[in-house]
Image (cartoon, rainbow, N blue to C red):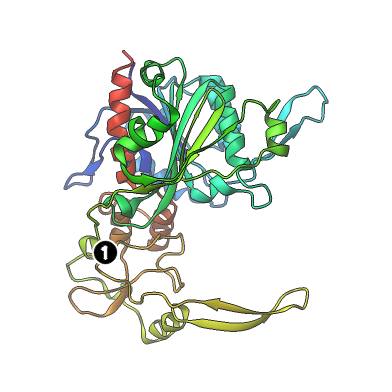
Amino acid sequence: MEKKVVELFAGVGGFRVGLNNVKLDKNGKTIEKNNFKFVWANQWEPSTKVQDAFLCYKTRFSKGNDDHEFSNEDISLVDKNSIPDFTLLTGGFPCQDYSVARSLSKEKGIEGKKGVLWWQINDILIKKNPPFVLLENVDRLLKSPSTQRGRDFGVMLRCFHDNNYSVEWRVINAAEYGHPQKRKRVYIFAYKNNTRHSESIIENTPEEIIFHKGIFAINFPISSNDKVTKKEIKDFVDLVEVSNDFEFSFENTGFLRDGIITTSKVYPHESKTINLIDILESNVIDSRYFLSEDNIKKFDYLKGNKRIDRISKSGHKYVYSEGKMTYPDDHNKPGRTMLTSEGTVNRSTHVVLDIITGEKRFITPIEAERLNEFPDNWTEMMSDKRRYFMMGNALVTGIVKKLGKSISKIIENEE
């Protein structure tokens, strides 16, 4: 079985950078060290005229004669049968409203909400039947929507079950496993039940897979865990019934097999941390990244304690409060979660003391790339604003790198 990969919602190539341990040489040429072959990638930004992420992806990975591998089209308009055959589907997709309903034709067809990108993934699972899937999402996916906790992830799991997959998941805070950013995301690994990998672990209980034998337990070991809870999703008639009636408290790790969900809250082993000081540039930094006196005053307010009297739209009076943040950011701790607003005068923005001058400044685009473990200057072909935005949207590639080593062995054992 060849290690052929499709990357959806590819951004600037986080999954590919991680799986292939990508580096840049002195001339900016991309060097892919592992043997995952990316046969097709889709990236499309609906709200921007200039497709910065796609252009970055294509610049870094184009070899001059294989442009058919890159798709800059709305994924909903792509004929899924035209996608090359592949072994592993990857993608980081938005957390959206996954509600489903009967079709208007009354032929008992099932329709997902329009514009929800999960249904494009599900369509590819049906049409292309890949043996392995690796996805990433924000951790609130497990608890959404607030009015019916767990429904959206339940819909996803039922789709996997209907397509004959088993599924493992884990919420991983990258900083807890030796990466430079406190970025918490849920990672989902699914595999067909007729694969050799599935057959090799079928004798293990769900608990053994979650705590010891599964891909997340092996790569991101735990120190302890709470009790497990279970729920059967196969007992629901179809996706419509799941959408209408399913509710469940998913914990930060779990396993789905044969339509039975097993989940538990686990606690990570302590790991040596990579801190901000480890990723800060030590050379002379351009003056444009240093804070003006006006910005210093604004950050003093934004990052300080607040108690503000407000009135809601209904006329109700309340007090809005915010606690004080560490300011400037502590060099001896991992970076906080980076948002797409990084580099602006915003409460969530990192402010560090420059190593040489000791003055307050923004992190540089290179440092933003380092927080996600991309090669330096990966996004240099776009403006600073867009570089920060891309990194605020990206994943910590080191997490994928760890998982990739296991997935590579799993695929090799399929032969």
**Which residue is at 25% across, 69% downward?**
331
In this rendering, is residue 375 above or below 291? above
Q: Could you tell whether 74 is left or right of 28 in the image?
A: right
Residue type (three-letter) at the residue carrying disc 1? Leu
Decide if residue 204 is on the left or right side of residue 256.
left
The residue labelled by disc 1 is 276
Residue 152, position as x, y percentages in the image:
61, 41
The residue located at (24%, 35%) in the rendering is 32
**In this view, 111 is above or below 194:** below
Question: Residue 362, percent across and down?
Answer: 34, 71
Q: Position of residue 70 (x, y in %)?
A: 43, 33
Q: Is residue 275 above or below residue 22?
A: below
Q: Closer to the camera, 87 or 69? A: 87
Secondary structure under tag 1 reads helix
Q: Quadrant of residue 284?
A: bottom left
At 41% from the left and 64% from the top, the residue drawn is 342
Report the front residue among 378 and 122.
Answer: 122
Residue 60 in the figure: left or right of residue 195: left
Q: Nearer the viewer, residue 327 or 216?
A: 216
In percent of width and height, residue 356 lies at: 17, 75
- Picture quarter with the N terminus: top left
The C terminus lies in quadrant: top left
Residue plotted at (61% across, 30% down): 233
In which quadrant of the rendered view does residue 349 lie? bottom left
